[in-house]
Image: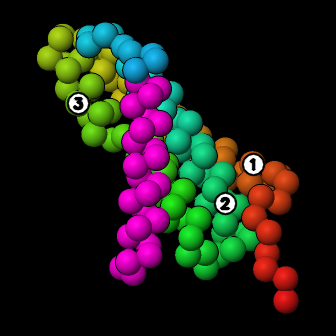
């Protein structure tokens, strides 16, 4: 991987991680209860990723800046599979199996739907990326 790409991912990842941490601090959720904050973060992030990739695929299929910076970096740092997994295990350990199962299904199905919806919105959204003029 090119050093520039690594730098873009690192900068974006730092920004996304700080954003996620900020949201988690503003809206904390007690262990053993439905993890609404992580679910909201992950659904918002997957929608934004679908929107970004849908836009870039149509407008700049060989993009070397926005995809690593925003897609891999910011949105990769903002969303969090590891927190989702830990919260699910914590719910199971707290004998909240129904909540854990609901959280898992809503996270996976909702994430797929959010990404699909974001990609669909990219088709009707105003032009977000300007092509280089020849």
Q: How far is the residue under mark 3 from the one under mark 2?
A: 30 Å
Residue 96 or residue 127, whichever sits in front: 127
Q: How far is the residue under mark 3 from the one under mark 1?
A: 32 Å
* Residue drawn at (75%, 48%) of the image: 121
Residue 17, by quadrant, is top left
Q: Is residue 4 magenta?
A: yes
The magenta-colored residue range is: 1-24
Residue 95, by quadrant, is top left
The reply to whether the C-beta atoms of the residues labelled 3 and 1 are less than 8 Å apart is no
Q: What element carries label 3?
A: helix
Q: Is residue 31 visible?
A: yes
Reading the chain from its start, which is encountered first: label 2 or label 1? 2
Q: Is the magenta stretch mostly helix, strand or loop?
A: helix
- Judging by the rendered image, the residue that carries numbered circle 3 is 86
Residue 112 or residue 55, whichever sits in front: 55
Quadrant showing the N terminus: bottom left
* Residue drawn at (38%, 78%) of the image: 3
Q: Could you say where residue 92 lies in the image, as x and y percent from the top left?
A: 19, 19
Up the image or down, 94 lies above or below 115; here it is above
- Judging by the rendered image, the residue that carries numbered circle 2 is 54
Q: What element carries label 1?
A: helix
Residue 97, by quadrant, is top left
- Judging by the rendered image, the residue that carries numbered circle 1 is 121
Quadrant showing the C terminus: bottom right
Reading the chain from its start, which is encountered first: label 3 or label 2? 2
């Amino acid at each position: 991987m090119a050093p520039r790409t690594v730098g873009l991912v690192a900068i974006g990842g730092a920004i996304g991680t700080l954003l996620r941490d900020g949201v988690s601090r503003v809206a904390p959720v007690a262990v053993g209860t439905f993890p609404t904050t992580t679910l909201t973060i992950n659904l918002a992030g997957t929608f934004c990723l679908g929107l970004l990739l849908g836009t870039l695929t149509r407008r700049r299929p060989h993009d070397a800046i926005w995809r690593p910076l925003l897609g891999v970096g910011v949105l990769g740092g903002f969303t969090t599979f590891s927190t989702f997994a830990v919260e699910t295990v914590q719910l199971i350990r707290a004998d909240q199996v129904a909540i854990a199962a609901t959280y898992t299904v809503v996270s996976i199905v909702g994430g797929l739907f959010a990404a699909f919806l974001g990609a669909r919105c990219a088709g009707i959204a105003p032009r977000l990326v300007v092509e280089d003029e020849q």
